[in-house]
Amino acid sequence: MPALFPISDHCDGRQFFNPRGHNDRNWRDIFSWKLSGLPTRWPAVAVNAPRPTAPLHGQRLAAT
């Protein structure tokens, strides 16, 4: 089957995965992590440069 997603260190083209393996975390770990950090300040402006899209073939759809 053809790849649906770009192949990378965390995607085989069809499925995403964690390259470092599974972390055994529970809800208490997540809650402790969330309460222990300070929120990051949002930037005043986010600049997004337009990128050209790859040509579409057949009955495919691109939405932005």
Image (spheres, rainbow, N blue to C red):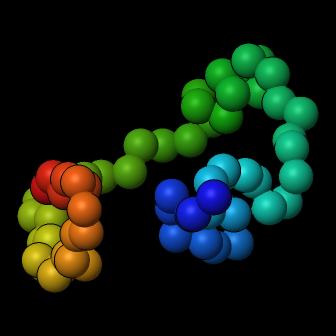
Q: How many marks?
A: 0
Seen from the viewer's position, the closer of residues 17 and 20 is: 17
- Does 8 sit left or right of 42 as displayed? right
Q: Is residue 43 visible?
A: no
Q: Is residue 5 left or right of residue 56?
A: right
Q: 64 or 29: nearer the eye?
A: 64
- Residue depicted at x 77% and y 27%: 29
Up/down of 43 relative to 31, above or below: below
Q: Quadrant of residue 20?
A: bottom right
Please state the horizontal and vertical placement of residue 14, each as a whole percent of the image: 62, 54
Image height of 25 relative to 55, above or below: above
14 sits left or right of 21 in the view: left
Does residue 15 show up? yes
User: Which residue reaches farthest front?
Assistant: 58
Residue 19 locus on image (x, y percent):
80, 61
As drawn, 56 above or below 34: below
Is residue 8 shown above or below 60?
below
Instruction: Identify the image quadrant of the C terminus.
Output: bottom left
